Every structure is written in C-alpha cells, then in structure tokens.
Amino acid sequence: MALTVAALALPTTGWAEKRTFDMTIEDTKITLVDKQQFHTFAFNGQVPGPLIHVKEGDELTVNVNNLTTLPHTIHWHGMLQKGTWRMDGVPDTTQAAIKPGDTFTYKFVAEPSGTMWYHCHVNVNEHVAMRGMWGPFIVDPKQPTPIEKKVTKDYIMMLSDWASKYAFKPGYGGVPGDVFDYFTLNGKAFPDSQPLRVNKGDVVRIRLIGAGELTHSIHIHGHVFKVAFKDGRPLPMPYEADTIMVGPGERYDLILTADNPGRWMVHDHVDSHTMNGDKPMGGLMTVIEYNEISRNDAFYAWKDKKFVPDFYYEESLKKPYGLHDAPGFKGQAVQ
Amino acid sequence: MALTVAALALPTTGWAEKRTFDMTIEDTKITLVDKQQFHTFAFNGQVPGPLIHVKEGDELTVNVNNLTTLPHTIHWHGMLQKGTWRMDGVPDTTQAAIKPGDTFTYKFVAEPSGTMWYHCHVNVNEHVAMRGMWGPFIVDPKQPTPIEKKVTKDYIMMLSDWASKYAFKPGYGGVPGDVFDYFTLNGKAFPDSQPLRVNKGDVVRIRLIGAGELTHSIHIHGHVFKVAFKDGRPLPMPYEADTIMVGPGERYDLILTADNPGRWMVHDHVDSHTMNGDKPMGGLMTVIEYNEISRNDAFYAWKDKKFVPDFYYEESLKKPYGLHDAPGFKGQAVQ
Amino acid sequence: MALTVAALALPTTGWAEKRTFDMTIEDTKITLVDKQQFHTFAFNGQVPGPLIHVKEGDELTVNVNNLTTLPHTIHWHGMLQKGTWRMDGVPDTTQAAIKPGDTFTYKFVAEPSGTMWYHCHVNVNEHVAMRGMWGPFIVDPKQPTPIEKKVTKDYIMMLSDWASKYAFKPGYGGVPGDVFDYFTLNGKAFPDSQPLRVNKGDVVRIRLIGAGELTHSIHIHGHVFKVAFKDGRPLPMPYEADTIMVGPGERYDLILTADNPGRWMVHDHVDSHTMNGDKPMGGLMTVIEYNEISRNDAFYAWKDKKFVPDFYYEESLKKPYGLHDAPGFKGQAVQ
C-alpha cells in the first residue's frame, strides 16, 4: 500500500480524449555549455522541444506553424498512424514539406504507448543531427506493466551531438566526415547539465532517447538497472546491465531501485563524448545525487551548483496530460 | 488455412541434396546512385553477389574462379564447416588465397540454417568495406519456427558503405580515418533503391545483413516489428521494436504484419547515412508501398518510379533452390 | 561426473575473505605490434593491468600509488560500492584525484559477481582511450549458473583502440575527430596477439570487455556461441549468435562448446579494425587453434608462432584468488 501511495499518481481521467496543441518552429540560439552557442530550428523556441504527454488512444490535433526560412515537417517517431499515413510527417513521401510561414495540421491517435519522440524529417543530417529539432513524446499505457507501476521518479534524457563548425551556419552541416565535438543531455553538456536528485527508496525510470547522429554507451555507477522497455515496448524478459548502447532513433527505459545513497556518475562511456570541444570532463555526464548525502565536499564539482528542477521533465511529467513548454530550455530568438 | 495458402510455398524436395555452383570474381564497375560509380571485385559480375538459397544439410560444391588481378577467397559467414575447416575461406589461416586466374573449390555442408552471407576474407578493410565482395546466403531450416511459417513476403537487405575517394583506386582504401560518404541498400542509394510493395495482410520478413564497415540504425515507420532471428538463429524470446542497430557482420530478421495501408519509410537513423556525398535525402532509405494506396500524389518523390522487382531478392527466393544471378545487380566489365 | 572433473576447479576456501592489494601507476612504454610503441600510464607497469580475481563478498583494500606526473583515480567498473560511494573513484565527485606521488586507499566489498574491470576516471578521453589505464576484475559468484559450471577454458579479452599520433605525447589526445589507427586484444594487435589453444570437448568462456573508445563487432568462425552474461549479470534467456557488438564499457561473456576441430578466426568485423595503421590483416584478430590439428601448413601465418600462455589470463584465472601480475604485459619504464 505504501508503495502505491509513493508511486507517481498519474492523471486518471477517461481515455481517448481529444487534445489540440499548437507548435511553432523558430530560429533560436541556444547555449550547449559555457560559451558554446548554436543556431537551432526550435520547437516552441526551445531545445529539446516541449513535452507531449498523453494517454494511449488519445486523439491528437497538432497545428505546426513554421516560422523559419527553411521547409520542415514533424515525424512522430513510434506512432503507428493507423489509417492516417499522411500524418507521418515525411517530406516527399507522406506530405509536401511545410514551407516557411505555413501551418500544417497533424491529426492522429496516440498509439502505441511508450517512450516516443518527435522530430523534423527534412534534411535530417542537419535538422535532426545539429539543429535541435526533436522533443519527447510520452504515451502512457492503458495497462501499465507491474514494473512501471512502482516508479516514483520518472526522467527523460535525450542524447545528441553537435558539430561546432556549423554552429552559426544554418542550412549547412551534417555531411559525412563532419567532426561532432559537443555532446549533450537534453541540450546541455556537463557541467551545465543538472543532477538527478533522488531519495533512498525511489524507483527510478530513465527514458533514454537517441536523438542525434552518434551512438552512446550510457553507464550508471553504483546500481544495476533493468532494461525494461525498448522503443516504448515492454521487453518480454527485462535484463540487468550497468551500461547500455543507445543508437540513433532508439529508446531504452531503464528502471533501478535507489537503494544506495551516494553520489553516482551517469555518463557516456564513449570516452571522447565526455569532452566539450577539446576540453575534458564535460559532455554527456551527470550525477545521481541522493538527498541523504551532503553535497558540500570541497572537491565536488557541483558543490555550489544551482539546482534547476524539471531538467529531465520530471516535474512536467507529473502535470495533467498535455503539451508542456519548459522555460529552462528556451533559447533566444534569432532575427 | 487461408494463411497457409498465402504463405510462401517453399520448394519441398528431399533434404541433403548435392548442389554444385560456379562463381567468378570480376573487375566490375557499378553505379551506387545517380552518376556515382565504383570499381568493385564482383561475384559473377554483380553487387550484391548472386543469391545462394539452399536447404539445411545440403552438400555444396562451389568452384570459384578469380578473374581479377588481386588475390581473394570466399568465407561463408555463419557456416559451421563441421569437419571442413579448410573450406572456411580465410587466407593464411585455412588456405592460401586464390591467385589471379586460379580456381578454388569449396565443399561443405549448409549448416546451420538461417540468414547467412558470404564475402572475401582478404584485405577486408578494402575488399569487403568498399569493393562489394559480398552476397546473400539463405539456408532454409528443416524445422521452421511458427513465426517464419506465416511469412508471405521475404526480403533481403544488405547494408554497406563506400568512400568515394577510392571509387577508381582498386587495391587501395579502407584505412582508419577514411570518410565513407555513400550508403547503400543492396548496392543502391535512394532514390535509386526500390520500394517494397506489399498487400494488406502480408506477413513481411526483412533479413538485414551488416555487410560493410559501419553500424546502421534501421527504423521502419508505421509498424512495430518483431526481432525474430539474430545471425540466422531464432531468438528464444523475440521482442518488439521500431528501430534496430545492425553492426558489421550481424544479421537480424525482422517480421511484421502488413496491417496498415500507407506509404512508410524504411531508413537508417544515423542521420548522415541518408546523404549521397554532400546531398541530403539519399543513402539508406526506401519506402514500403501498400498496393492498396495510389502512388500519384504530386509531392511523392517516387510517383513516376520505374518499379524493378527482385531488388530485395523477393522473387529469387521463390525460385527452386540454387544459385540465382540477378541481372539488375550486374555491372559493367572493367578491362 | 566426468564433466565436473574436467571443469575448472575454482579455489573453494570460505567466502568474504579480506584481501589487500598494492598497485602503482607508472609511466610505461609498451609495444602494440611490430615497431608501434605507445606511452601509457600503466597499472603495475603493465597493459592490461594485473588481473584482480576475487570472490563475491570479499572485503578488498587496494593501495594505489601514483608514480606518474599527472593525477589519476581508479574506478571499479561494475562494483555497487554499497555504503562506500567515496570509494567509487570519480575525480571531483567521489574524491579528489590522486596527485603525483600520492597514495589513495580504496576499501570496498566485491559485489556483484561477474566480469568487471577497473580504469582511471580522470580525463577518460585520453587516459582510458589511449593510455592503457584498464585491467580485468573478475568476481566469482557464490552461486554459479549451470552454464558457467561447465566451463573448462576461461579467457579474458579487453578490446581497445589507439591513435598513433599521440603515442609519445602523454597528456594529450583523445579529442573528437582523432583517428584511431591501432586496435588491440589485451594490448596487442595481430600478428603479435596469441592464439586460443583448445581441445575438442572444452567448454570455452570468452569474457569480452569494451575498454576503449570504439565499438567492436566480434565474430567467431566455426561455432555458434551463447551470449550468457551482459555486464557480469547472467542473461535470463541466453541467445545464440556468431557476432556480438561490444560497446565502450560493456562486457559480454560468450560460452561455446569446442566441438569442431580446426583453425578458426576470432576478429572484429569492423573492417578497418583489422588494420595496423595503413597495413591490412592486423588489428583485432586471433585464431582458435584446436590442439588436435597440426599447425604446420605452409600457408599458415602462425605456423612458426612462439606460443605464450596466459595471454588471455587463462592461467592466472586458475591461480588462488588475488591480484596477479602478468610478466608478458609488462612494458619498459619511461624516465
């Protein structure tokens, strides 16, 4: 009983609701880390894009207004689009791309459930690989699995890569041979990423989404996790690991029990992905901080860290179903 | 009953037949896409090589005549070679390489069953990675699994990569640091690849073979597939996914039910692998076209596409067991 | 009964023993292959580092003396560090890095069991990716699985990558875009690696450890193996394969029955990883040699090979529990 109370109380209104969302695509300058900025084509002016959190079977209408100077679409990665293939968001295959200034309306049913994402499907080598055109799309299941019912902390981590050479050359970049030299968690590199703050006893779900060009080998210290979902679908036989390879387009949901108070690294084991340009000890790194443990060791890189909640959408995921902008991910408009 | 009738009628003569094949290796110029040509060492003058389709337990004799100016072998990737290790095709380990002009005869039993392939084992960094020295080798099982008995459409996709810098420098290339800038499905990049044309109700098997240097993250739109076989062997517990990483040498057999009429992308989610050189929207991409859906949308890139069947060996796989050349994959002889 | 006798007789003294080890970190020159040398920061002056072989639950004390001119730590990859998070070896998170000349003492319980490893966690892009700062750490389980009880030959293979440009620039290298051009098995590239010599009837365990920057696709000829463990943890449903992708930080334990006398390649199917610089037929390659088969074919690259046992720690793993230096991996001290 106590466990049930502690678990995330999901909104429990009826299924198959109709929901309408408005989205824009905007020329937006974001900061990856320190002084490294990047010109993106940002959904609602933020990278990652806003969280879309709905229920399996919901009927969605999304009006997308392209405010940039290049054509785009939105592909809803993982959605079956049963009977609605023209809503799949692929230029020259399911639709003509959305021209600058135009609006396109996507209408489809949220099916199947799981950790999904959305992204542009025009010139993916540039728009997805280094213009930040992606966001999380979580579809709650009608019938949760036993393991996910126990979750008390739910985090989303979108993994991506950036080639600084093209930071301010929108319309270019992402060609074979390009050197990707920045690596981010939800658009930020260490030390400008945020910790995951947990309590002993939490059941933690980490939803990894391979949103960029490269493959990442995510290692979590101090815990063995269960690999519970692949591409949103429950694995028939979850298995244990401490490191998981996440390729472009893939999603893995990891579930672990927070039973080991301490300060634990979460990082990419591809060694060069912990660089910010040519500077070591950055990139795809963060820390699981147990609230039971003091953070004031003199040696701790984050001892004076200003904690910004919702960096992993953990607060947004508790809100009522809908589309949730995240002020922390907003960039600056580019004229 | 209807399903059984619809399923692929496999040739059903007795097992453990003796079969003899002749193969050549020829200097051959092929076209990857548009004007991008490549000098290959092609089995029977084609890339991919001819389909070898036999039954588990068949006794095979393959006479290989090397008509190029460099040494080669054939390794039968996945074959156990029980009691015939000298037929394994590894230069300087199981045999001396086949010199220019010479013939070598491989004799072995086709075991185990599954999606296998063959390739040269001399200087693999060049010969396998960018000279097209590979072909599909399908061994039908004595006892098919329930899931594969339902298949009505059977496709083979060999994934590979090319460094155009070496297109016409045979004997060179494939060294660390080389930039691979073309990416192909059965030797062709989009838009010169071919669609997969299916009917509603088909049970589709896609046999992915990682034949090149790089890892590919294959995503299929509009369907959840079962990952049913790994390296030809049935998985004890198939799992669902919409994206699958295929590394060099690996094979994955995906099985999906065609229950969603539409036009659906199949592509590599490594973003830069959808480039042809520096041109976007090419590379490792194709479309599943349901025959129920008209193809004449003005925006459709393939609305005037000349359909060439058997591009995925789907017709050859229905022929009697044997070695099947594919005229569509033939290149031009190089003097 | 016979099988039990043939299986590796593990040391069987009581559990939860206390063990104390001393380790140094030393500027050391090693040879990867032929004349290609590399400046490393070597644990006990060897690459890979010494084998640590203990039992689940053992209480370990490791005194680490940094004799180099740069700061380091040791992270015990896979160890839970229950209640001992300050022993996790992450600079600026769990401890201050060990300064040149200083000693740090790690105290922790060996838990969980399985194929683990240890490595520096300072500037991993250089220290792990190309300074050889890693070694094997095997924790035997209290309750072995049925499959591992049958093992008669136990091998460890650490996979790593090197960028020769930085061979003699300690303190530099491992930045995005670097070209890795040497690829090693336990620090040696073919032909300077060693064969695995087995007898018909052996049950062979190969413990693959992804210790470097890159992903490797390991293919074994002539056998189908079971993938039995991932990151030290038993898979609930082992599966068959002939090729396995091993990413940075990952471990896979393969188990195969030696039932096919012959000479069989084990190699990376990433084609360019079989190069030594720009020279083909090197890199991540070795051969399983059955003792039943003569090695004197004129064409055999290793017909005159001087066999050096324990290259895969197969002899050290039979010794009493402890830390075992391997003279064969020692390099030369660098002043």
Image (cartoon, coloured by chain):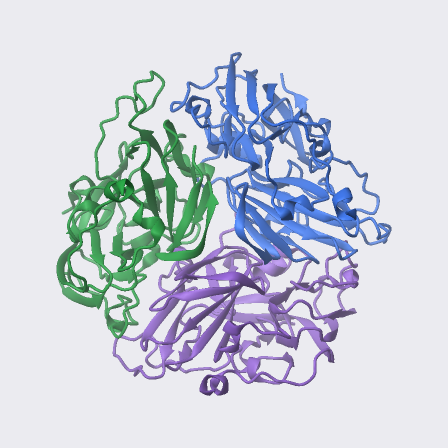
Chain colours: A purple, B blue, C green
Instruction: Choose top left, top right, bottom left or bottom right for residue A200.
Output: bottom left
The x and y percentages for residue C183 are: 36, 41
B261 sits to left or right of B179: right
Instruction: Choose top left, top right, bottom left or bottom right for residue C283.
Output: top left
Vertical arrangement, residue B294 with respect to residue A64, above or below = above
Q: Nearer the viewer, residue B308 or C34?
A: B308
Residue furthest top in the image: B101
The x and y percentages for residue C313 are: 23, 43
Q: Nearer the viewer, residue A262 or A29?
A: A262
Residue appearing at x 37%, y 44% in the figure: C255
A200 sits to left or right of A77: left
What quarter of the picture does the C terminus of chain A occupy? bottom right
User: How many numbered marks are there?
Assistant: 0
Vertical arrangement, residue B248 with respect to residue A167, above or below = above
Whether residue C195 appears in this view of the structure is: no
The x and y percentages for residue B168 are: 58, 27
Residue appearing at x 48%, y 72% in the figure: A205
The x and y percentages for residue C178 are: 41, 48
Whether residue C109 appears in this view of the structure is: yes
Q: Nearer the viewer, residue B198 or A243?
A: B198
Residue appearing at x 30%, y 25% in the figure: C292
